[in-house]
Amino acid sequence: MIACAVAIIPMSRTSFIRAEQPLAPDLAADNTTGRGGGATSRRRDIVFIVNPRGANGRTGKEWKKLLPYLRSRLDSDCNICESLTSGPCHAIDITREAIREGADAVIAVGGDGTLHEVVNGFFWGGKPVSDHDQSGHTTALGLIPLGTGSDFARTFGWKNDPHEAIERISRGIRSRIDVGVIAGESAELHYFINVADVHLSAKAGYYASRYKKFGNFCYVIGALQAFFGHHNQDLRIKVDDGDWEVYSQVTALCIGNAKYFGGGMKITPNADPSSRNFEVVVLQDFKWYDFILKMHKLYNGTHLSVKNVSSRSARTIEVEEIASRHSIFVQSDGEYLGFLPRKFSILPGVIEMIC
């Protein structure tokens, strides 16, 4: 076995750091011929995208500790390629280049924010990057949770254990999952894999991002800050191209492709990333004390039985303000996107994920 040491080399904004072991010359081939003339499985090319500043620098430190174990498990049949992100949106560019160059898998190493960027990197020009490639090769998505929040992993019941994640990657079992796409007033599209949300919860997430140094407690701080000056608002909603409906005094609206957000809150408890539908949960006319009294229900997923909470399944949902003040926050996977109006649509089975 030839060791795959990782070399950090100067790179442009869109390049990734390669292993010193050369990548397989024909990435589209299913096998290569060994010295004895027999067919052997070709080495898989796996790109690990790491946010070294994630979780106040803890992600980078944990990743360095993890590398020896990663090499010991994967070096025998994989070319390990490492890329450290240098700033916001860098993971998007790295992912696109990795897919174009025929990587077998791109692995997000970090929290939900890094995963969110990597998922957006699977798309370009309104289509999957793979659709621009005529070879028919498919790049899988993987996850090693090492960040502040790992809400998406909770839906699969995955522990926040990187060694367990490496075992999944070693097995390489793939499953098709859905991705949400968000369209606004501009032509730009935005993709999400976990939960998108509107109004109070989105505002809380916006403020929580400022307090990541406090770990998961940042979500509590963000929620408290969001309550100051908050007003429930009437919204206009259209589901699956039906008629427009008015939802009065909306506190928060959550569109779940998966179940959890906000550091473990089971907000869309019936969501399934392979269901080809969102679960849409609407909280109406909540006061600050309602959250305190019902917080445990929001975390264990039993809040759907609470008064003024409704749930429905949807393939698409359009949401508009009635007052048109451009003051209703929107976020997806914990990333602030701006304000309403927005249209949320499901892309069924569009990504293969290592599960």
Image (tube, rainbow, N blue to C red):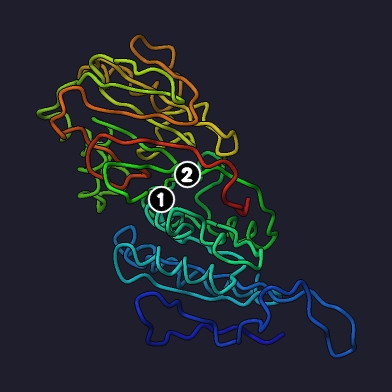
- The number of numbered badges drawn on the structure is 2
Sort mark 2 into few (<14), some (14-19) or many (20+) by Cα contacts within 10 Å.
Answer: many
Q: Pick the residue in front: 73 or 79.
A: 79
Q: Residue at x 68, y 87 (%)?
A: 2
Rendered residue at 53%/31% (across/down)? 277
User: Which residue lies under the disc numbered 2?
Assistant: 152
Q: Identify which residue, 145 or 177, lies in the foreground.
A: 177
Q: Secondary structure at mark 1?
A: helix
* The furthest residue to the bottom: 35
Around disc 1, counting alpha carbons within 10 Å, would you say few (fewer than 14), some (14 to 19), or many (20 or more)? many
Q: Is residue 57 above or below residue 33?
A: above
Q: Is residue 150 above or below residue 346?
A: below
Residue 188's x, y, as percent?
33, 51
Q: Nearer the viewer, residue 139 or 220?
A: 139
Q: Looking at numbered disc 1 in the image, what kind of residue is underneath it?
A: Asp
Residue at left 28%, top 21%?
A: 236
Q: Position of residue 16 (x, y in %)?
A: 45, 76
Q: Position of residue 316 (x, y in %)?
A: 45, 31
CA–CA distance in space, label 2 to label 1: 7 Å
| Residues marked 2 and 1 touching at CB (< 8 Å) | yes
Image vertical order of residue 38 relative to residue 108, above or below: below
Q: Secondary structure at mark 2?
A: helix
Q: Is residue 186 left or right of residue 190?
A: left
In this rendering, position of residue 110 left or right of residue 142: left
Residue in the picture at 90% in, 87% down: 37
Residue 119 lies, with reference to residue 179, above or below; the image says below
Name the quarter where the N terminus is drawn: bottom right
Task: Determine whether, in the image, residue 3 is placed left or right of residue 328.
Answer: right
Q: Please identify the residue farthest to the top as the structure is shown.
A: 307
Residue type marked 2: Phe
The dot on residue 112 is 1
